[in-house]
Amino acid sequence: MTQPPWSKTSWQQCTALQQPNWPDKKEFAQVVDTISQLPPLVFAGEIRELKKELAMAAEGEAFLLQGGDCAEAFSMCTAPAIRELLKVILQMAVVMSYAGGKPVIKVGRMAGQYAKPRSADTEMVGGIELPSYRGDMVNGIEPNIEARRPDPERMLKGYYLSCSTMNLLRAFTQGGYAALERVHSWNNAFVKNSPQGQQYEKLARQIDQAINFMRIVGIDTDIPQLKQASFYTSHEALLLGYEQALTRQDSTTGDWYDCSGHMLWIGERTRQLDGAHVEFFRGVHNPIGVKIGPNHDIDNVKQLVRTLNPENEPGRLTLITRFGAKKIGDGLPLLAREMKKEGFKLVWSCDPMHGNTYTAESGHKTRNFDEIMNEIRSFFEIHWSEGTVPGGIHFEMTGENVTECTGGGRKILDHHLAENYLTNCDPRLNAEQSLELAFQIAELMRE
Ligand code: PEP
Ligand code: MN
């Protein structure tokens, strides 16, 4: 089926949901123009490299680990916050790649995760109704009318802070910080110091032995493969003006790439077949994710896959399912079966966060560790039984010691949530909870 011509502005002819109501349209257009003159954040060659790795994940030869904040905050664009999140993702990847016997593709929800879709235009904060917070690239979270007014200058600030984040990520991952031995020593410290650490001691010891073995047989641990890590960035590509501004034509292939991040995804609320987001993303060559929730229509998903990946190129499309632990058993088996019947080459990734959100008695939005793990376990089991490949995992997480999700080794309970609840949007796993999940997923991957 031939598709109508695409350009980086053709989305403007379609309905774009979840766009801020910018008060000054001229100012918005000027900011988009300014950003379109600025350098790209990532490069086409890197994006192609990620796509190749994701093509392996589609075949079960690699595993995607994608994680980071629900909403990055401008105020948290600091070296310690970036370093701590990167550190946990690297730690998780070592455990999972050892146990799974395959490379783990590390993708941060970082360096651009500044715009949020919301279910309503207004929200109640402390008894007053205010325009909803839509991410730091749109408006401020402070609970007053002025802060909540969309300000296009925030897109420019988001661009610069994304550059800053990207710069530090490149430095950390290339400069020796990500060396295998160092990352594993952090894992050993976690195993020693966490309340349930002993449970993971056996696996940690086996990794010790593997590293020792390399040393004994004379493998030089100073080589780039063991000293450096490849790390990619991603965000929900919600603000189409921003994405358009960073979309560039690659000089070697002539193809268009959205250079705001390596991987971009379309959220559950903006994946309408005739909508602006789908129109925009069908034309760029990045790896694309699409969130799929329990209320999807199978035929609609099939059409989405055909529209976004007409060549059936492996690595191009990741379906990120987010059913919730209670609903995954009803929805995923049929979805996986039908996509397999079509012969679609897909990466199947599990977002065990967004279908498991509930409000605690204290009023905090939260998620429970066991429910998260239950959804992950079902995800693996369903794909195994359908003959499809569980190819990745998608977390909302932070390197900070927050109390936003309940459960885990430290048994965070509802009444602990207020102690260190910092998120601007959805509740995140803290560093320990994230690592515990990695060890538990590692056990699953070995089955
Ligand atoms: C998110 O990833 O933060 C999000 C809003 O997810 P979804 O589109 O699946 O609701
Ligand atoms: Mn979220």
Image (spheres, rainbow, N blue to C red):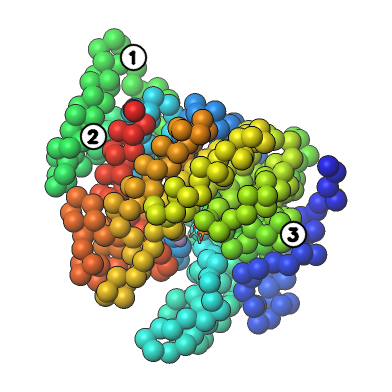
In the picture as drawn, the residue positioned furthest to the bottom comes out as 128
Q: Which mark is residue 185?
A: 2
Bin the neighbour count of mark 1 within 10 Å (Cα to Cα): few under 14, some 14-19, many 20 and up. Answer: few
Q: Amino acid at mark 2?
A: Ser
Q: Where residue 430 sits: x, y (%)? A: 30, 55
Secondary structure under tag 3 reads loop
Q: Residue at x 68, y 49 (%)?
A: 299
Per the image, the residue denoted by label 1 is 219
**Residue that mark 3 sits on:** 274
Please tell me in which quadrant of the rendered image residue 381 appears: top left
**Which mark is first along the chain, 1 or 2?**
2
In the rendering, at what x and y percent does residue 358 appear? 36, 66
Q: With 198 as the anchor, is 247 left or right in this view?
A: right
Q: Are marks 2 and 3 in contact (CB under 8 Å)?
A: no
Mark nearest the camera among 2 and 3 is 3
Residue at screen point 20% across, 67% down: 416
Number of numbered tags placed on the structure image: 3
- Quadrant assignment for the C terminus: top left
The vertical placement of 50 against 155, above or below, is above
Q: Report, in whole angstroms, how far the alpha carbon at label 2 lies from the one at label 1.
A: 19 Å
- Tell me the residue at 72%/71% (across/down): 29
Give above or below for 103 relative to 153: above
In the picture, the quarter occupied by the N terminus is top right
Residue 241: percent from left, percent from top: 68, 64
Please tell me whether residue 147 is drawn above or below residue 336 in the rendered image: below
Tell me which label, 2 or 3, sits earlier in the chain: 2
* Dot 3 alpha-carbon crowd within 10 angstroms: few under 14, some 14 to 19, many 20 or more: few
**From the viewer's perspective, is 393 left or right of 115?**
left
Task: Give whichever of discs 3 and 1 has the lower sequence position.
Answer: 1
